[in-house]
Amino acid sequence: MKKYYLAVTYDVCEHNNLFEDMNEYPLDMSSDLEKQISKFAKMDVAPLVKVYESDTSDFQELRLYKEYKLKEFECGCNQ
Ligand SMILES: [Zn+2]
């Protein structure tokens, strides 16, 4: 069965209890996943990107597939 993948970027700041989804991007699994993730993270300056998997293209039911943490985009509150 064909599966569909969606990347969601998150804005996270533990110091301000912030955990907010920003944007959703459909993924092309035939090309390099990590490259796509780092591109989306950079565009949104997102310290966290989650990849969700779905059996349908409307993404009614999502399963968490992978999670990427990007240290370089973490907030600088405690520095
Ligand atoms: Zn912070």
Image: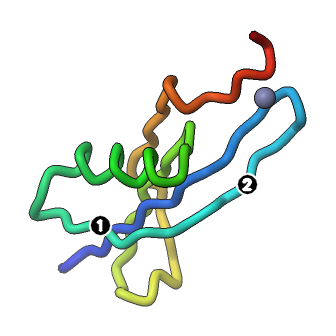
* Amino acid beneath label 1: Leu
Q: Residues within 10 Å of mark 1 (few under 14, many from 20)?
A: some
Q: Measuring 38% from the left and 66% from the top, which residue is drawn there?
A: 53
Q: Secondary structure at mark 1?
A: loop
| Residue 13 quadrant | top right
Looking at the rendering, the quadrant in which ligand 1 lies is: top right
Along the line of sight, the residue nearer the viewer: 45 or 26: 45
- Residue under numbered circle 2: 20
Residue 17 lies, in percent from the top left, at: 87, 38
Location of the N terminus by quadrant is bottom left
* Amino acid beneath label 2: Glu
- The scheme the figure's colours follow is rainbow
Residue 4 lies, in percent from the top left, at: 30, 74
Q: Measuring 34% from the left and 68% from the top, which residue is drawn there?
A: 5
Mark number displayed over residue 27? 1
Give left or right: position of 20 versus 71: right
Q: Are marks 1 and 2 in contact (CB under 8 Å)?
A: no
Residue 10 lies, in percent from the top left, at: 61, 50
Location of the C terminus by quadrant is top right
